[in-house]
Amino acid sequence: MKSIYILIGSFISLIILTGCSTKGYSNYTWDKENMLKNPGFEIIKNNKIAYWESEGVVRSTDPRANSGKYYLMSSTNKEKAITSQVIDVNAYQENIDKGNVIASFGGFQSGWKKQKDYGYSVLVFYDDKPSKISHASTQPFYSNHWWTKRANVVAVPEETRFIKYGFMGIRKEGTNNDAYLDDAFLYLGQKKVNIKNDEATLKSKEKVKEESYFDEALDFLSEKISLKNK
C-alpha cells in the first residue's frame, strides 16, 4: 500500500493509494498477481531495465521513488519515448473469448518540479497471429513533483492472446523527457459464474477518447510485437 501527502492550499491531505483499481467491479474475481514483470523498475541487467523494451533510464532522486529505490525516467534526450512489455494471456483464453475478462492498468506518475512533460499508459491487444485488435489508454497527465496514481479499466477483446503495456512519455520543456513512472500495473479480472445482474458494463472514471494525443503513439500502436523471452 502506498501513501503520499499532497498539499492543497493550506491543507495537507493523506491519500491511501493501492495498486489495482477494482472498486465497483464486484462481479469479477481479480488476480492478485500483477501481470507485469519488474513493475517498479528495480531490476537492472547489463545496464538495461530488465523485462522492458525501453528508451528510458532509472532514476532515484528528485523526487524519490514512489516505492523502492528506482523509477522510470522516459528518456534523457528524446521528445517522445516509449517503454513497453508484452504479456502472454493464453491461459485466460476461454474466458477472454466469452467476453468475461477485464483489465485494470496504469501506474504512479510524477515529473520534475513544475515542468509539463507528461505521460500516459497504453494497452494494445493482439490475437494469436499476432495482429492488433484494439487499444486503450489512460488520460495524458503531468504532475508537479508528486506521485499520483493513474488508472483505467477496460474490457479485454475476444480473441486476445497477447497484451502490450506501454508508457508514452512526452517532453514539453527542457532537455530530458521527465515523464516518470513507478509501480506500473496490469491486473486481469474474470467474471464470476452464475451472475444474474450483469455489472459487466464498464464504468471507468477515465473516459478516454481517441483524441489527437494518440498521434504521438502511432508507431507504437502499429508496430508488430516481439514474442522473444526477456
Image (cartoon, grey):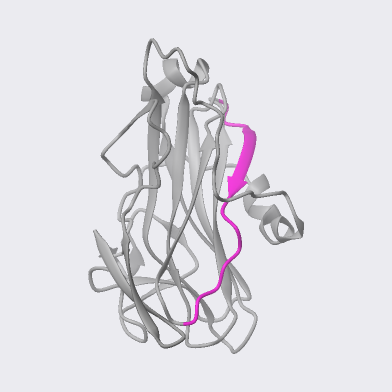
Residue 111 magenta: no
Left or right, 78 with reference to 62: right
Residue at 46%, 70% in the rendered image: 56
Residue at 43%, 18% in the rendered image: 95
The residue lying furthest to the front in this view is: 10
Residue at 51%, 26% in the rendered image: 200
Q: Is residue 43 visible?
A: no
Q: Nearer the viewer, residue 6 or 171?
A: 6
Residue at 37%, 30% in the rendered image: 26
Magenta segment, which residues? 129-144
Q: Quadrant of the N terminus?
A: bottom left
Q: Nearer the viewer, residue 182 or 16?
A: 16
Q: Is residue 214 visible?
A: yes
| Quadrant position of residue 5 | bottom left
Residue 177 location, x and y as percent? 54, 78
Query: Main SS type for the magenta part?
Result: loop
Residue 161 location, x and y as percent? 49, 28
